[in-house]
Image: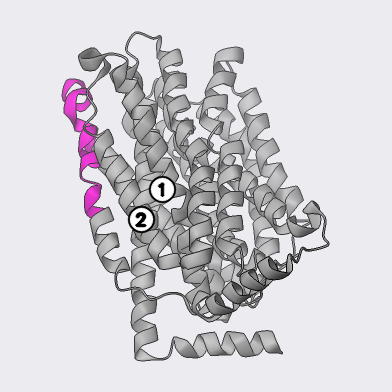
Amino acid sequence: MLGDLMNQIQDDILKTKEGKKSFKNAIISCWLGTAMEYADFVLYGLAAATVFGKVFYPEQTPIIALMLSFATYGVGFIARPIGAFFFGRLGDKYGRKEVMMITIFLMGAATTLIGFIPSYNSIGILAPLLLVILRFLQGFGAGAELSGGAIMLGEYAPSKNRGLVSSIIALGSNSGTLIASGIWFLLGFLDDKDFLEWGWRLPFIFSFLIAAFALYLRRFVGETPVFAKQKEKMQKQREQNLKTHKTENKTFWQKNKSFFIMLGLRMGENAPSYIAQSFLVGYVYTILLLDKQIATTGVLIASFLGFLVIPLSGWLSDKFGRRIMYRIFCLLLMIYAVPAFMLLDSKNEIIVICVIVVGMCLASLGIFGVQAAYGVEMFGCKNRYTKMALAKEIGGILSGGTAPFLATYFINLTHNWYLIAAYFIFMAGIGFVTTFFAPETRGRDLNLIEDAI
């Protein structure tokens, strides 16, 4: 009863003129911020798959250069949980808005500077070293951006449509993928010399435009209704706990069940996602020796379809529940893996494009559309930002951050795709099994202090 009342109060805030304006700015700025994050990471993934080996590791064999490129790709994932913990704590203590102003600036600056790094032939070992440093800073800011955006939208959204509204974060990621793959597709028409010398740098350099616009909009976003209501209460509780030295009589597992559930759900999504949208690009180009435009075309088509797939999955999670939809997507990913690589071996351009499109629609789009609201509802408002961001980013390290590198290693080790498919199934299976331990959270009152389980 109390939960229904709190949800109604939150919904009523959105009916006011000020509430509507702030909600609108929150939607656009979160969309742009996530677009910025994913444009950064997709650009980096595409560049790692096709360019960075030649620019930063020219003295290595093609397969070793590809592995080193994906290793620097993983550095961003190592930085993400550090950023998630650092900024998540600030977000839970001082509010969502200020933190998200900082993260978008940090991401934009790091990405733009990557475009200005001289090649290995110009400055030697300093070139890949600078790449690693900027990749770390990029990941440090991004670690809190995605979860922060999902939390801001979830805490603003009408309770009955939280899945649909929160999926806008996934639309932002899809927009970033579309922007990055679209620009990369156009740059593919340059001759190889111009592409390697300066063409690949352009999208990195001009990414600051997205960051600047998102930063501008976030100045006019109010604090979320949930955090604004709970801030004073949570501060008083912290002070009271310090005075009385009050501790919870719960085990580590009891206090962090939702954290580990979110960790498992994230792993089930993230590894398949980065194999589908990053590794397969390098696989098609470097191993199958097809034109680089083939894989990029697949990513581009999937990105367009994402504007239908993502809101549909969010709406379905509002209608049927978060848990069942997440389980279905993980199961479909497990079924997809082996046929996907068998079809890729055909080297038929149309079939290759279709395989990439289907993989991205399942792993990078549909399941992500469900995950946004699910993650926000899994945690109580006291530590929502910290726990959610940390769970998602540690899950990212254990899955997405290492997936392209491991997949490339498996190819180098066995010279076939069998281990990659097995790894793909195993990671999607983690998400599938986790859903049997996860609660159903649809419509949960976000003002509650405690986690969902």
Q: Which residue is mark 2?
A: 102
Snapshot quadrant of residue 381: bottom right
SS of the residue at dot 1?
Answer: helix
Against 48, residue 314 (above or below) is below
Name the residue type under label 1.
Gly
Q: Are marks 1 and 2 in contact (CB under 8 Å)?
A: yes
Q: Which residues are magenta?
A: 185-210
Residue nearest the viewer, comparing 253 with 147: 253
Residue nearest the viewer, comparing 256 with 376: 256
Residue at x 34% of width, y 31% of height: 47
Residue nearest the viewer, comparing 293 with 34: 34
Q: Callout 1: few (<14), some (14-19), or many (20+) C-alpha neighbours within 10 Å?
A: many
* C-alpha distance separating marks 1 and 2: 8 Å
Q: Is residue 135 left or right of residue 276?
A: left
Residue 149 spot, x, y in % from top left: 45, 62
Snapshot quadrant of residue 9: bottom right
Residue at x 53% of width, y 81% of height: 229
The label on residue 141 is 1
Against 88, residue 230 (above or below) is below
Quadrant, the C terminus: bottom right
Main secondary structure along the magenta-highlighted residues? helix
Residue at x 73% of width, y 69% of height: 244
Quadrant, the N terminus: bottom right
Residue 341 spot, x, y in % from top left: 57, 30
Q: Does residue 288 show up? A: no
Dot placed on the residue nearer the N-terminal end, 1 or 2: 2
By what rule are the colours in the image chosen?
one colour
Name the residue type under label 2.
Ile
SS of the residue at dot 2?
Answer: helix
Snapshot quadrant of residue 297: top left
Q: Give yes or no for residue 401 being in the magenta stretch.
A: no
